[in-house]
Image (cartoon, rainbow, N blue to C red):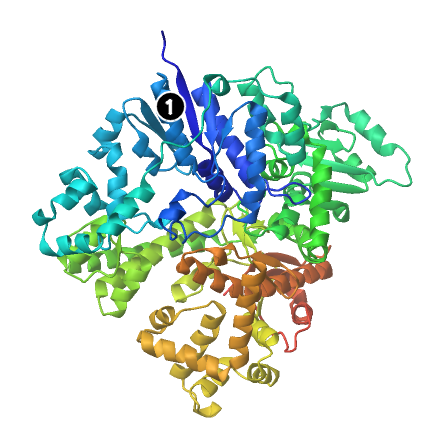
Amino acid sequence: MKQKTVYLFDGTSFAYRAFYAIKGLSTSKGFPTNAIYGFARMFLKLYRELKPEYVAVAFDVSRKTFREKISSDYKANRKPAPDDFKAQLPYIKKFLTCLGIPVIEKEGFEADDILGTLAGKLSEKRFKVIIVSPDKDIRQLINEKVSVLSITPQKKTEILYTFEKFIDTFDYSPSQIPDIFGLAGDTSDNIPGVPGIGEKTATKLIKEFGSLENLYENLEKLPPKRKETLKNFKEQAFISKQLATIDCNVPIDVSEKELKKKNPDEKCLSELLKELEMVSIVKELKEIFPSLKLSNNIEESKEVEESKIEEFLKEKDLFTKKKIGLLDNKKTIVAVQESLFSSIEKPEKFIELADEIFTFNLKEFYHKYGNTKHHKKFFDISIGEYLLNSIQKDYSPETIIKKHLKIVEIENTEKFAHHIIKIGETVKKELIKENLLTLYKEIEHPLIEVLFFMEKRGVLFDRDYMENLKETLTERMTKLEKLIFQIAGKTFNLNSPKQLSKILFDKLQIKPVKKTKSGYSTDVEVLTTLALNGYKIAEYILEYRKYSKLIGTFVDGIVKHMDRNGRVHTTFIQTGTATGRLSSSEPNLQNLPVSDEISKQIRKSVIAPENYLLLWADYSQIELRILAHLSQDEKLIKAYKEGKDIHRETASILFNVDFSSVDEKMRKVAKMVNFGIIYGMSPQGLSQRLGIPINEAKEYIENYFKKFPSVKEFIEKTIDEAYRKGYVKTLFGRKRPVPELKAKNSNIRNFGERAAFNAVIQGTAADIMKIAMIKLFNQFKNTNIYLTLQVHDEIVMEVPESQINPVRKQVKEIMESATNLDIPLTVDINTGKRWE
């Protein structure tokens, strides 16, 4: 007779992991569903794989168990379970009950104790028992009749530990786990163990002596110091073992019949999934239980002839807006509210007939059809989503549709085409609720058209100049290579961090700066430190890497994307940064370097066409001006209103000298501190930039805040608000979520604080730049004057030579009046045949 197998699940552990693994899921009424959804997905995946005939799931009832009577400190370090988690537990249990899975719990005991008790009783009844759990301490229950399927959801690993497998892997018996905990303790459960004894030492001692009891009978065999410690903490060691030991005598009894697999309750499941708006798991449920007659309640779109869509849009209805959804993949899909869609080649007539059009990535649609005549009718859902959460990784149609319809996978987006309208309306409502619709309408939406025409025009590069530049850079690299090999005393692969590390730290015996898992680091930070300490080889390697990057990323990267006329049509990305700044790709022209003379040569490769000049307009110190406006610092505002050199003025205040006595060294320090404050630069960062000791850099920053107290106050206020609200806002209302501030790791929190403050300054600067671009575009639309490029605080334009003087004046006026700050915005304008 075949032995029966029963699977016993650790419900509490899986529920907790699901809660922390998935964020942000809730019903339309705001009830959290992340733990329920995550648990359901995990459980159904395992259920499908294991195909259990007998099954049960155990849960904790409350935090108070018999272990608190043994030690009041047990789990005292743990925070109470979050309210959102506790609210979802009854639904997780109901989900299991609807599936016909028995839920087992007992007041005063943990899920582990229930699992241990059931495992013991069922193995006596000749069941093969497999406990399914992500926790390690459950492994103490493993014996000849009980195995543990150890799950690590994050790593997506599953290991079945039989008694033999466990001993082969760990070289000790599962029953010795409580003895090891008795010595090493368990910080997660606040089990103290014996001070100074870690898991490694505890395991070694228990393997040698067999048990905690036997260890204490043989203390004389241990070194004096270890013996003394164990003697002093004997009681604590045995209490720790007791706390870690699973109680296998819980007063529960479950019959074989109760554990036998049952058919799910369709009505129960249908009502529950509808209440929780979790229709996305219907597909998985049907795969596991084919007889289930559940509906996913997501109406699929029906494909019809073009004429049907046209008929619908032509129907006269004075009270209802005609709305369409536009999905542009390999073919263009037009959908209407009535669950209908059609694949079409020419969408123009539908766009004419519609009052409102919802779509994704509108700019790409324009590139396909080339007409922005009805720009105001469109709503770009991707950009709306971006404004609601600027740190989301993906704003593709598939991701957004899955999120809003709570679907796991999309085989064909056409099936959900008519839902685009509903999703678009939902996003618009969210924008209104978050006070972001004005930002969308006045900045982001008009900018789509601006960027489309900029991409269409492209940036003109001088191909011959680029090829000559590549030759120059290659020659420099060859010379540097010889110098590096000369110092190293041998040739090696300069692009291999491993070989470079051996040369620097083994052969040349240079003291390493930092270590990584793979060895001593040779990153930019390390090489910069070594160069500052006088190691010429580090200086040459940094220069070599810089030229290599200039060739690979910029020279070759740009040439590769040139069209036959020498123009490069980069793609500007509106949803690419958390702060609102634009980014670009294919190629990335946002990071064109300007740090030194050779880097500036790249910019010089941008040229004006025949009979044109380039005009480039740069906001002068826009981020510092924004800082002065937002902080209301009197000294900064006064300096800007008087038109003073802000870095010289800062140096005068910082070093307590007359304005006229400030030398270039003082000004350099002040400039670095000014910009360092905006980017949250640490004393270490400032010391590296200026090549000064950390103490001196720290003194400069502290002195700055003493002299400019309003700036410090504004920074603290901004960070405090970020902690309270979870986000920061720019002057124009753009939001940047800062989840890093909730991290337990102080390094991550520190990064969050810097990101929060920087987002306010940099994001406001980005908004002002976008406003200026829109105003310039509207001014010169339908003329022979073109915007071609925007990089950080600078705009590049192509202007006919004959119009350069009046246009120069117009550009300056438009950009300086983009918004009203308490201090004037200043724009520096240059012109020429090449961008410099």
Q: Where's residue 808, x and y in %?
A: 65, 69
Task: Work out whether residue 785 can be spotted.
Answer: yes
User: Of the residues shown, which amino acid type is indicated by label 1?
Assistant: Lys
**The N terminus lies in which quarter of the figure?**
top left
**Looking at the picture, how far across and down is residue 397, in whole percent?**
62, 38
Name, please, the residue furthest toward the top. Answer: 1
Q: Does residue 587 appear left or right of residue 306 in this picture?
A: left
Would residue 371 be seen by someone viewing this image from the given angle?
Answer: no
Q: Give the percent coordinates (x, y) of residue 449.
A: 68, 51
Q: Nearer the viewer, residue 250 or 380?
A: 250
Name the quadrant containing residue 474: bottom left
**Would you place residue 328 above or below residue 238 in this image?**
above
> Mark 1, residues whose alpha carbon is within 10 Å: few (<14), some, or many (≥20)?
some
Q: Position of residue 800 (x, y in %)?
A: 65, 61
Q: Quadrant of residue 630?
A: bottom right
Quarter of image, res 67: top left
- Asked if residue 644 lies left or right of residue 237, the reply is right
Residue name at image x 27 percent, y 56 percent: 522
Residue indicated by mark 1: 121
Residue at 22%, 51% in the rendered image: 234
Residue at the outermost left position: 221
Front-most of residues 474 and 276: 276
Q: Secondary structure at mark 1?
A: helix
Give the number of marks.
1
